[in-house]
Image (cartoon, coloured by chain):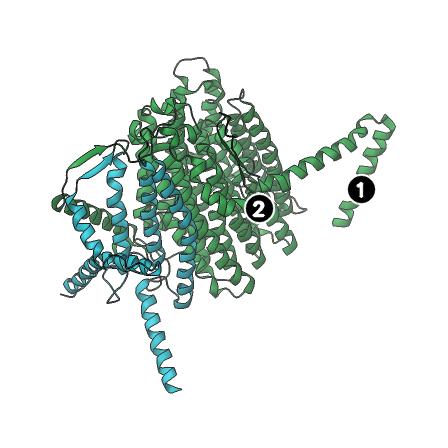
Chain colours: A green, B cyan
Amino acid sequence: MMLSVALVCAAALLALAVLAVLLARAPYVGRLIYAACMIVTAVSLAAALTHLLATRVPEALTLPVGLPWLGAHLRLDALSAFFLAVVDLGAMTASLFAIGYGEHESAPERVVPFFPAFLAGMTLVVLADDAFTFLLSWEFMSLTSWALVISHHRVPENVRAGYIYLLMASFGTLALLLAFGLLAGSDGLYTFAQMRAAHPAAATDALVLLLVLIGAGSKAGLVPLHVWLPLAHPAAPSHVSALMSGVMTKVAVYGFVRIVFDLAGAPSWWWSIVILTVAGITTVMGVLYALMQHDLKRLLAYHTVENIGIIFIGLGLALAFKSQGMLFAAALALTAALLHVFNHSLFKSLLFFGAGAVLTTTGERDMEHLGGLIHRMPQTAFVFLIGCAAISALPPLNGFVSEWLTFQAILLSPQLPSWGLKLLVPAIGALLALSAALAVACFVKAYGITFLGGPRTRAAETASETDWFSRMAMMVLASLCLLAGILPGLFIDALAPISSFLIGESMPTQVGAQWLSIVPIAESRSSYDGLLVFLFMALSGTLAAFVIHRLASDRLRRAPAWDCGYPDAGVVTQYSATSFAQPIRRVFGTVVFRARETVEMAPPDDTRPARLTVELHDPIWEWIYAPLAGAIGVVADRLNHLQFLTIRQFLTLVFCTLVVLLLVLALWS
Amino acid sequence: MVLIRDLTIQGVQMLLVLLLAPLFTGFVRKVKARLLRRRGPPLIQPYFDLVRLMRKDVVLADSASWLFRVIPYLVFAATWVAASLVPTFRTGLLFSWSADLIAIAALLGSGRFFLALAGLDVGTSFGGIGSSREVMIASLAEPAMIMIVFTLALIAGSTQLSTMSAFMARRRSVCASRSRLR
């Protein structure tokens, strides 16, 4: 029943896409389509939540479309219902935001039709139950989002971003295609049910894991496959950036969880070593990259890389515990990862909406040209602050809860029998702690430079508060961030069916615990109560304010800020994003990015200003992608003469290829 | 009755932390001064400073926003909540289960986050330099602190402060009795 509702919603979204093309010239078509998208995704969200919280019985359906002998298999179980809810919640708020934001779009006919299609693509990926439907929806999702990335196609930067995105997306899909090919085996078992029943050899399973890590990891943004993400996410219009960063990366996580935890066979212990290493590097690299940025949207995109790393740390831990038979700990780690999936989709959408609101009113993404927006956009500034605090994992907001659960899972690692994991996991914990601290630095910078201080340009000076719809969307997300932070037990309990489905064990029910605290293992071991921490903070803050105002002098004077006696400091003397990050750039950047600062001082008789140039090198691009691109260029040049062969030579070539392929097939089977 | 006793203990504990905190600041200043071979201010100087500051007007910069007005209370609240969860003279505090050591570290992090924001709010380069250095030091100190928490938690098998301190106390008594036996 709920599956049919979700499918009807997906079909309605596709119909809306067609409608948007037909009505492209009509007035108010954008608002209409976005409003319709919001209603449809709200229905779909209700269906997903009903399944996740109430019915909980897997539903399957075969539609007579797609490949003739196969049909399209679709299924709604706890895992897909959860990810469907994440997709729909993000889509709903993005549509609400876009009702207002879409009015500022310069070329709406390039955005409006693709938006519902993109939503439909993501919905179908999480519902697919056979390899063909999955890959088709996955590609549909990639292509529609690519179209949205290059919607401002006159900017050369966006076209390049679109090109790299398209390359990486097709590469990722190729890896997934091969992974499904291996899972299907020589019998061609295309449905997920058949794959689940089949037991491939351990070597095949290992190859599947690596391919999925490449395929889903490139979409999610695991280092070193993340290069497209910080280019493509900021290039799209902001509501689409929010969807790509907050939701589409989660669909990639879904693909990974579905294949590795559900379809592939029993995990080996070394799988988690691969995943944890990649995830740990992703986490720290993501936040370090983010710290070096001064483009607000690009900073947020790099931060997605970091959070994907945190999610994969949870998933890697879950695999480690599962492979050693510690099902309870595995359930804890998986729940932490899934909760972070949900949390990240909330605050990342919120932050991208905020960046979009800033972009529409000032036309600026560069933080060095902003400043002081808290005076002109007080409501946006307030909700953006909540988003910043949540993503920096500060209690009592939601980001802290999932990171805390991940830490609790890490602390169970001494019980692992394998020495490799015993040594690796605490190191990953250290990386996680480092990235959490750097995230705080990063968001102090993002918020402080953009919203605080004085306006650095005329555009920032004349900014005004954004429209009602956009504010509404951000407030919904901000209140959800707070709610998930102070009542995490409710959300953890909703995830229980998933871990019992994938692992066979789930975390104990949290809602019954006293004062709605969360107790992952036992109270003597660890517990956290967001509600009480929130209440205590509110109480002690109010009490302090009351006491100070009663006892102390409550007269208030305004005066110019003291700046060492300089008469007119001017806004340019404020700290900028680059100068704020300088100490961290010197500590970490000199090693990771080979950062070099050169100061160019004009000689005494010259009136030129002094110049500070900061040079950064992207290690991943220079060491992996540039050589790769070079090698492909060289090979293409060498093979160029193959285009000018005679017909006889071509036929010989085709024949030889055929013989080689047949030989390979004969040897393999 | 038990509840009232526990509440009193929790309250006394919170007040104690609040009252002793300036003394500790004074002690740190004294040590710093002695290391520089100065005599330094008296130990209870921070109390005098607080009383004096209470009598003064609030002076806000022209460019300061509402955030600048709120942040001191936020920083105080986060720090006080974190401090009141630490058992000082008695373990098993009434609300000690509401946050563990990781949460306490994160609460202190919250305080630092808002403090750094306040530095940037006025828009002078002094505020900027302060908050920039604050977050840089924090980004190095916080992982170190979490690592120490980890080490203790791995030994004690818990991140709950009451459990950890009880475990350490037991261990110490075991060690002491062992050394006596020798």
* Residue count near mark 2 (Cα–Cα under 10 Å), binned few <14, some 14–19, many ≥20: many
Which quadrant holds the C terminus of chain B?
Answer: bottom left
Question: Which structural element holds mark 1?
Answer: helix
Chain of residue at mark 2: A
At a point 52% along the width and 46% down the height, the residue shown is A282
Q: Do dots 2 and 1 share one subunit? A: yes
Q: Amino acid at mark 1?
A: Val
- Provide residue A177's location: percent of width, then percent of height: 62, 40
- Amino acid at dot 2: Leu
Residue A598 location (% of width, % of height) = 54, 37
Nearer to me, A36 or B110: B110
* Residue to which mark 2 is pinned: A213
Mark found first going from the N terminus, 2 or 1: 2
Camera-side residue: A495 or A159?
A: A159
Distance of mark 2 from mark 1, alpha carbons? 29 Å
Query: In the orientation shown, which residue stands out farthest toward the right?
Result: A648
Which residue occupies 30% across, 47% down?
A486
Read off the residue under disc 1. A660
